[in-house]
Image (cartoon, helix red, strand yellow):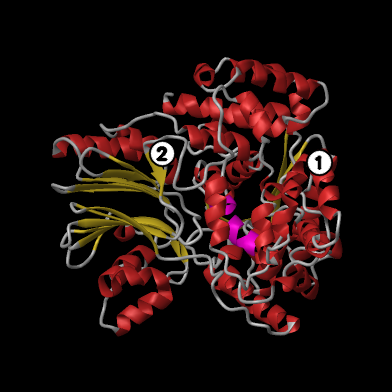
């Protein structure tokens, strides 16, 4: 795990570019405190900050050159199956001088060209400079576990693992993208390829960006496997296959030359990871859990301790108070260059800060909800099936119209006629706002000075339009979550909070083989009208995970933020948000003030307030 940066057709002299890349690298020091290096010729400059995980020797440092010196690599991530690929290359006559996955990645490109990424099982953001073809190849992993940003300069492009280094470019601009700002306020994150800045873009997951003097070409090499056929195997057979692939996925993510731990909550996802490690007979695993002084639903330490004792892990837990939160707030917000208003980033930051003294790698249960069907999808499925059955009953349109006015979250029911001709798999495209919970258009137009378009509409239309007719509603929803919510929200803040503490997070549930399998089985094996993550729960029961963990209501990372905002943090946060100068160009400040007043009156506006607090600090970081 590392930080990378560079320029193609850099501006100024070689000396200026050398100085600039060093400044860019210094802004990524938290991502790679163990080593650094840079490469420069007359066209390209590449920088690398290293967090040593596999092959700790100096020989594995980057930038790395191919034996022919025709290609140069900087790379952030891990290739879990690099040993198998290495063996395949050795059979072709290739030889290696290190034990690193970086060397395998570089050599694989030289042998197989761009197709080599299809062989990779891992997470990555890499840049390969092909000196012979005079082009640079940027790539981001299939699901988007590793971030990758770029921007156009007057002569070429500049790129980085994070946004701040891009501002060392002569071409930098901090003009805000108004549509992206509306997305961020309404839905708490921004979908790729946009960022909050017009000048800066994200390379979407599963994409190449190839840059040469002929131009810039962005194109996909991977799509969520919604187009694959459904294999109608028996449910018990699917459980057996899931068990095989999931345990293999966990085992793959143990490749490391440094200690590994697990982020352990009181829920089924992280508990399943620990159970799989126990089944694989992995010893000496450290687990880490956080709780809050408020106790009750805000403290999962008891459940986590149950799992730790059951499987014999070396367990660490600790408490966070409102005062401790304030103490670490600057560290959290400093790393929100691509803002995500998800409260889960708070405990994650503190967990990684606590863990860094004993491990460099943490396994996480993240992604289980998106690939196995979690959250409240059983309720969504009940709604969809109810509409599907009731849609042809006379006068139901009248009832639906009344209900749509009573409950804002059911506003989609006012278009009752549309449901009459839809296939059941097309329903999620119509009830999307029950899935994303954005602010209403009315609220958005109160907050913003200028009228804003409903966020996400066009992008979500495009996502759902790609769902083939043989797919049901659950697969349609999961495919869309994997394309947007997962990389741009969850994996974004997971990477930023872990790397702020020089920690690498690995997600066994996001293995491409596992995702391929889960989209090949009937969706009813994943979600029913009564149960989410059905396959995982059945696996956990079989492995002996306690039922009180398996069937515990999903908590996420429960945080007493709402309570804090009604107490000692209220004035401090309110003064910070309302004193943000750049807000005055976009927002009605009186309306933002009302949000704080409503909070004291009992309405829970905590997530929206957290969003504005993050945006306030983001503007400071970006010099807006």
Give the residue at x 66% y 47%: 436
- Quadrant holding the C terminus: top left
Q: Is residue 167 left or right of residue 294?
A: left
Residue 562: in magenta span: no
Looking at the picture, how far across and down is residue 510, in whole percent?
A: 57, 63
Q: Local crowd at mark 1 within 10 Å, few (<14), some, or many (≥20)?
A: few
Q: Is residue 268 above or below residue 608?
A: below
Give the residue at x 49% y 63%: 256
Give the residue at x 59% y 50%: 485
Q: Is residue 93 visible?
A: yes
Q: Is residue 497 left or right of residue 199?
A: right
Name the residue tied to disc 1: 407
Residue 163 badge: 2
Q: Farthest residue toward the front? A: 394
Q: Local crowd at mark 2 within 10 Å, few (<14), some, or many (≥20)?
A: many
Residue interval drawn in magenta = 476-488
Looking at the picture, how far across and down is residue 81, in whole percent?
A: 45, 72
Looking at the picture, how far across and down is residue 440, in whole percent?
A: 68, 36
Q: Nearer the viewer, residue 407 or 235?
A: 407
Q: Nearer the viewer, residue 252 or 438?
A: 438
Give the residue at x 54% y 72%: 227
Q: Measure the alpha-carbon separation of dots 1 and 2.
A: 40 Å
Do labels 1 and 2 touch, CB within 8 Å? no
Q: Nearer the viewer, residue 542 or 487?
A: 487
Looking at the picture, how far across and down is residue 420, in whole percent?
A: 73, 61
Residue 56 image-quadrant placement: bottom left
Q: Is residue 85 left or right of residue 458?
A: left
| Secondary-structure class at tag 2 | loop
């Amino acid at each position: 795990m590392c930080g990378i940066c560079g320029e193609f057709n850099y501006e100024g002299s070689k000396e200026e570019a050398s100085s600039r890349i060093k400044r860019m690298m210094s802004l990524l020091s938290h991502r790679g405190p163990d080593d650094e290096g840079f490469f420069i010729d007359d066209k390209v400059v590449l920088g690398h900050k290293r967090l040593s995980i596999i092959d700790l020797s100096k020989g594995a440092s980057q930038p790395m050159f191919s034996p022919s010196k025709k290609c140069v690599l900087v790379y952030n991530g891990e290739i879990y199956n690099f040993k198998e690929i290495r063996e395949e290359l050795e059979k072709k006559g290739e030889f290696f001088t290190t034990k690193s996955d970086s060397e395998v990645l570089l050599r694989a490109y030289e042998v197989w060209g761009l197709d080599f990424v299809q062989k990779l099982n891992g997470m990555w953001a890499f840049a390969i400079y092909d000196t012979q073809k005079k082009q640079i190849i940027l790539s981001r992993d299939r699901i988007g576990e590793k971030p990758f940003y770029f921007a156009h300069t007057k002569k070429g492009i500049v790129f980085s693992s994070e946004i701040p280094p891009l501002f060392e470019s002569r071409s930098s601009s901090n003009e805000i993208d108004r549509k992206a700002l509306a997305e961020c306020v309404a839905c708490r994150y921004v979908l790729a390829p946009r960022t909050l800045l017009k000048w800066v873009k994200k390379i979407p997951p599963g994409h190449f960006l190839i840059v040469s003097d002929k131009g810039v070409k962005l194109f996909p090499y991977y799509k969520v496997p919604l187009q694959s056929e459904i294999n109608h195997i028996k449910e018990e057979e699917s459980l057996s296959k899931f068990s095989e692939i999931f345990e293999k996925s966990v085992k793959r993510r143990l490749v490391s030359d440094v200690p590994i731990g697990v982020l352990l909550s009181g829920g089924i996802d992280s508990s399943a990871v620990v159970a799989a490690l126990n089944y694989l007979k992995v010893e000496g695993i450290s687990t880490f859990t956080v709780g809050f002084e408020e106790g009750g639903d805000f403290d999962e330490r008891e459940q986590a301790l149950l799992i730790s004792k059951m499987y014999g892990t070396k367990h660490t837990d600790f408490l966070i108070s409102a005062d401790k939160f304030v103490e670490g707030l600057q560290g959290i917000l400093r790393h929100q260059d691509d803002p995500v208003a998800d409260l889960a980033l708070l405990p994650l930051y503190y967990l990684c800060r606590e863990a860094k003294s004993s491990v460099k790698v943490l396994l996480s249960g993240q992604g289980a909800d998106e690939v196995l069907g979690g959250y409240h999808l059983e309720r969504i499925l009940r709604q969809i099936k109810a509409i599907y059955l009731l849609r042809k009953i006379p006068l139901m349109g009248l009832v639906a119209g009344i209900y749509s006015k009573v409950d804002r979250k059911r506003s989609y029911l006012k278009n009752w006629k549309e449901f009459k001709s839809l296939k059941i798999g097309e329903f999620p495209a119509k009830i999307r706002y029950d899935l994303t919970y954005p602010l209403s258009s009315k609220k958005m137009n109160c907050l913003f000075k200028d009228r804003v378009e409903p966020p996400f509409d066009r992008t979500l239309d495009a996502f759902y339009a790609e769902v083939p007719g043989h797919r049901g509603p659950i697969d349609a929803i999961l495919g869309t979550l994997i394309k947007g919510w997962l990389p741009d929200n969850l994996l974004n803040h997971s990477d930023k909070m872990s790397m702020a503490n020089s920690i690498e997070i690995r997600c066994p549930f996001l293995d491409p083989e596992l995702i391929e399998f889960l989209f090949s089985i009937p969706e009813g094996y994943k979600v029913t009208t009564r149960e989410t993550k059905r396959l995982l729960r059945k696996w956990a029961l079989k492995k002996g995970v306690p039922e009180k963990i398996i069937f515990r209501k999903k908590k996420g990372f429960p945080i007493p933020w709402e309570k804090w905002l009604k107490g000692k943090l209220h004035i401090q946060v309110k003064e910070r948000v309302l004193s943000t100068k750049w807000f005055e160009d976009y927002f009605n400040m009186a309306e933002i003030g009302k949000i704080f007043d409503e909070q004291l009156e009992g309405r829970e506006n905590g997530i929206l307030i957290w969003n504005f607090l993050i945006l306030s600090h983001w503007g400071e970081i970006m010099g807006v």
